[in-house]
Amino acid sequence: MLVFAIATAVTITKKGNDKGSDRTELAQGKKYVCSMHPQVIRDEPGDCPICGMFLIEMVAQDQNSFDSSLVGIVRCVNSTVLGSVKNVFPVTDTLPVVIEAPGIINYDPRRVQSISARFAGYIEKTFVKYQFQHIKKGQKIYEIFSPEVYTERWNYVRLIQTYPDRDDLTVEALEWFRLLGLSKGQVDSIKRTTIPDYHLPVYSYAEGYAVSTDFDPENFFINGFSNSRNSGALLAGTGNIGLNDGLTVETGTPLFKLIDVRALRVDLKVKSEFTPLLREGQQVMLTDAAYPEKQFKAYIGQIEPLNGGLFQTVKVYLRDEEQLLLPGRQIEARIITGSREGLWVPATAVVDLGQSSSVFVLEDNKYIAREVRTGIRAKDKTEILYGVDENTLIAEKALLLVDSDGFINAN
């Protein structure tokens, strides 16, 4: 009986010690983990320092079965993903390339003429009053009081009165009158005048719309469009061009400018990657939002040198006889550049990351993000310069595999 009691006591004591040891070991072995960020592990409950979610108790691996094939997915979700999307192979093909680019309609600076005073005098009355006033060729633009012209006219009158049969003596005088802009009718009237007048009307030798001498078509709608000083000059009938009654002018003094509103230039912003495809004389189809059913045909007249930026300026010239296009408006252009052979993938298969581009390649039933270098875009296809080949199976719609943060760690 004594031996049995001792054995029983030892047994009870041993069991009690084992139970306390298990409780201590369990308390020390508890870990808490974030369900969204498995790298966050703590010894006690709390909140995840990354997302703020409540930490849950970690279950020992020997008590939780898992699929080892998913290790690569849960370990690096920004570069390896699972998904159910359509897959495609890159295709080598020759596709027509049409470059789409936005632009701003401007006046053609080559069709802007400067009207200057051809002789000195005092402008008594002007007939050019406001910005964008239409001036016809041969129209009277001002009347001037000019002693200088009076002297020359008087010498001519005395010459033809003294030598009526000597036309050779008046050749230089007639040429000088022509350079002054005097019409044939004005010269003929001088012949019939006994005493010339100090007053002389001046007629326009060109046709166009009058603007002030500081009007710069190169920068008017780009740099000065928001300038309050120029805002009034956008409308015909507003603003003074500076040619006022009582103005004293010298020979060669700029008076105003004439622009041809039918001669336009469109400044296009074309991506630098398309530069090798551009040529002077290429056809350009322009579409204005105000006339979506109408296309305006033009041709590239000038390609500015590359400046290292993402875009370069391409200047397109055209005639708008119907005067439908308004300078200062934005317009869309399509440049016909021919065809290009290359390796093409759907444009939706490429994710633009700013500094680089990526596609999702299918490997071992998983999509792996792979960096690629892209070329131009033709229709709904994107050219691939390197990174994949014709035997690489990629996701057709890559954005479906990108997480909410849009972060991709490409191989």
Image (cartoon, rainbow, N blue to C red):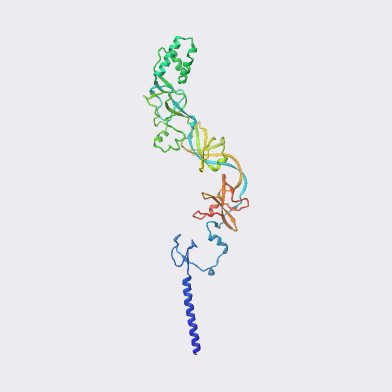
List the single residue furthest toward the left.
246
Q: Residue at x 44, y 17 (%)?
A: 186
Identity of the residue furthest to the bottom in this view? 1
Depth check: 25 or 227 in front? 25
Residue 121 position by quadrant? top left
Tell me the quarter of the image containing the C terminus: bottom right
Q: Is residue 348 above or below residue 296?
A: below
Q: Position of residue 78 (x, y in %)?
A: 52, 56
Residue 293 visible to an observer of this rendering: no
Is 15 located above or below residue 215 in the figure? below
Above-or-below relation of 166 to 357: above
- How many labels were placed on the picture? 0
Whether residue 394 appears in this view of the structure is: yes
The image shows residue 396 at horizontal and vertical percentages of 57, 51
Front one among 291 and 76:
76
Q: Residue at x 59, y 55 (%)?
A: 362
Q: Percent from the top left, x then y, of residue 388? A: 60, 51
Q: Nearer the viewer, residue 121 or 336?
A: 121
The picture places residue 225, in percent across and down from the top left corner, at 43, 37
> In the picture provided, is 405 more to the left or to the right than 382?
left
